[in-house]
Image: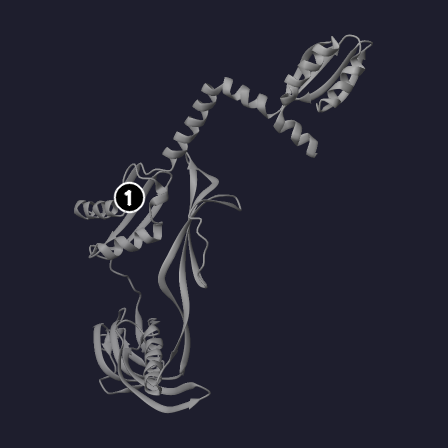
Amino acid sequence: MKNHWMHFFSGSVKVVITGKGTERFINECVRQGIVVWDVKKPGTHALSFSMYLKDIKKVRRVVRKNQCKLRFIGKKGLPFLIQKALYNSGFLIGAISFLMIVTLLSNMVWGIKVEGAKPETEHLIIQELKKLGVERGKLQFFIEDNESLQRHLEDAINDITWIGVELNGTTYHFEVVEKNQPEPPEQFSPRNLVANKKAIIKKLIVEEGRPVVMENDFVKKGDLLVSGKIGKEGEEIYVPARGKIFGETWYKYTVEKEITTKLEVLTGENIQKHYISIGDMRVPIWGFAKVEFKNYQTETNKKHIKFFNWELPIAYEKDTVHESEDITIKYPTKEAIEEAKRIGRNTLEQNLDSDAEIIEEKVLRQSINNGKVKLEIKYNVIENIVTTIPLVQGD
């Protein structure tokens, strides 16, 4: 196998020698350091064999000494392939140039479509996209991913509620939902409003229906708050009760907070590495510096190369290696208690509706054991306690 590759890379020729003393010819070649192989005897005064391309000058001198005639009958190997490629270089260069140009054009931005936006909003979006480098003729490799574009546009333009970003081939599609768009009125069947938990009624906002409770009433889960049956006895009609009933409710949380906390933070130092990936293989093309950070986090941005609308198994990858370090924070007891309170409050707020309000917070129990602060906290909350149940005639 090793000789096979040597023959290929060095190039070899097959020759035929004729004349008297062909055996002496072979012996002289060996003495001159000319490597021959595949020696055959096609006739009485003829020998054929293969030899390296680089030994042709040497073999000519041997031919002259032995009064033999030499004829080349074959050639193979890398040097001849290169010679053939150079002979057809015009076609080869044209084909490679065509593929490179098509691949380059397939990975550029050639269209930007904004749907669902008013002309003035569309103009603002186009201006923001130019700041981000999203415009016709730009390479897609150097443009942020779709999620980053979406987040930037939603933060930068106040007139939009949501924007969807999709890259289809060489065209970016932006689907916009603007603010202050009227929503179609919801249609409800007749129903009652009932309490979804025990509470003390604090505020009633009834849009439709007959309230059956008043402020400061105590209700339990399932108690009727607003009836969907209205009108005089015998002339009742059934309507979908609508409104909000705010009541004071109570929650109890147990929160633990370690006094000593270990955190991994970024120092701000980073290095970038660039790769071309083919399948699972990654070939570095820039950024060869060795990562000398003791601790680090790696962020990878990968973009596939396209040929027309096909996504090739070749991609450009950029790794950003951020240096990080572990730090230990030791809270004083008072700060640990405040941090535990903050954690408890944040946990409760995540489980409440946006119109709910925490009106009171009281620590019932407090202890410090095994390096942890443990709090039992009671919260008083004003929130909407309404849930609905269908109302059927005759209820």
* Front residue of this view, candidates 240 and 71: 71
Which image quadrant is residue 259 in?
Answer: bottom left
Query: x and y percent of residue 383 in the render?
Result: 28, 78
Q: For the image shown, how many numbered marks are present on the structure?
A: 1
Position above or below: 283 against 234: above
Tag 1: residue type?
Answer: Val
Residue 205 higher or lower than 73, as above or below: below
Between 160 and 308, the residue placed more toward the observer is: 308
Comparing 111 with 248, the one in front is 111
- The residue singled out by tag 1 in the image is 134
Q: How is the image coloured?
A: one colour
Q: Residue at x 58, y 21 (%)?
A: 80
| Kind of element beneath mark 1 | loop
Q: Who's the residue at 30% across and 38% down the image?
A: 111
Seen in the picture, residue 305 relative to 345 is either above or below; the reply is: above
* Residue 233 coordinates in the image, percent (x, y): 24, 78
Residue 188 quadrant? bottom left
* Percent x, y of residue 319: 42, 52
Rendered residue at 23%/55% (across/down): 156
User: Measured from the top left, where is residue 149 in percent x and y?
Assistant: 31, 51
108 and 345: which is toward the camera: 108
Q: Is residue 362 above or below residue 292?
A: below
Q: Residues within 10 Å of mark 1 (few under 14, many from 20)?
A: many
Q: Is residue 41 visible?
A: no
